[in-house]
Amino acid sequence: MGHLRELLPKEPMAPISTEKIEIGDDWGYQLKWDGVRILAGIDHGQVSLYSRKLLDKTTLYPEVVAALSTLQHDRLLLDGEVVYFHPELGRPVFQKVLQRERSRSVRSGAPLFTYVLFDILVDGDKDMRKLPYLDRHHRLKEIVSTTPGILTADLFLEGESLWAWAEERGWEGIVMKRLSSPYREGKKHRDWYKKKIAITMQAEAVALIIREGRVASLVLADDENNYIGRASLGLNEQTKQRLLEYAGLHPSGAGWKTLHADLKKEQLAWLSKPLTATVTFLEWSQDGMMRHPKLLSIEGV
DNA sequence: TAGCCATAGTCTCGTGTGTA
DNA sequence: TACACACGAGACTATGGCTA
């Protein structure tokens, strides 16, 4: 086998979004850890971390490097997620990971991250990728069973109850994996699926954000006319054109007196008759904004 | 011609950094 | 001090190419 760097996949195996829970003897289930995907290589004591796009992240997560350095193995290629586990909430908090990703150096006293492993690609001289996922997971458990700062994502055999547990505790969702599946790059497979927990609500679309004469996104407010974010996912060209026509029929010269910083640099077309939009999103951010909003429907257009 | 797949492009998130 | 910009990941739409 060649150098570990040469064995990295072009992109890590990624789960495909779905709405249904796969059921059958060949399926296993894991909690979806909300963090950033990291591949880790250990080559005779030398630890390297790589992002989904194979950017070097070794210096960004020194605590993960330190934890991996304690493993008594000459050569490993591992796949997992770096997360910040909030002790009071009892679940990962993605915002903390974003903070670390945006910073170029790690301050002393910075929150400590955990490396949650869910796959192994190389073990010594053995290429593990062709083995069934169940075998790879077993091997992973053996390797990192009691290593501080590292854990192996538990594998459950009952999907519905794990989904209910995750939903109740505010986790991001679950991942379903075919136990007999090999490791394949990207999404060129039908072996890993994810089902995400989302909040669905009705919001008022009070304005359109216009860029180069086209509708870019909707400005959304709650029922007390507070700004809760902007949304563009779910808008296709046909809907954007209809929205533009609607704005022409129902223009308003007056918008909010104080604009959120998010909107100050945008060209806005305020609506005299706001539209009711059904929107789904992952969670509320700390400042009351929707995270990853997606429009399901808009009444009246 | 329809359906599938891959790829490109767009948008959003929060914070650090650089500049006026 | 205020503002603009960049960063990486994820999710989605649009588009073009290929195949049956």
Image (cartoon, coloured by chain):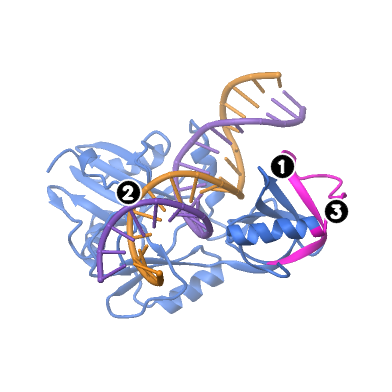
Chain colours: A blue, B orange, C purple
Tell me the quarter of the picture where residue A233 sits: bottom right
Name the residue beneath numbered marker 1: A266
Nearest to the observer: residue A187 or residue A113:
A187
Residue A145 in which image quadrant: bottom left
Question: Magenta stretch containing residue A262, yes or no?
Answer: yes
Circle 1: residue type: Glu
Q: Is residue B16 above or below residue A99?
A: above
Residue that label 2 marks: A11
Q: Is residue A97 visible?
A: yes
User: Looking at numbered disc 2 in the image, what kind of residue is underneath it?
Assistant: Glu
Q: Secondary structure at mark 3?
A: loop
Q: What residue would you read off at disc 3? A: A252
Q: State whether discs 3 and 1 lie on one chain.
A: yes
Q: Nearer the viewer, mark 2 or mark 3?
A: 3
State whether discs 1 and 2 lie on one chain: yes
Magenta-drawn segment: A249-277
State if disc 1 and disc 3 touch (CB < 8 Å).
Answer: no
Tag nearer the camera, 1 or 2 = 1
Q: Secondary structure at mark 2?
A: loop
Residue in the image at 30% along x and 63% along y: A189
Q: How many residues crowd mark 2 within 10 Å: few (<14), some (14–19), many (20+)?
A: some
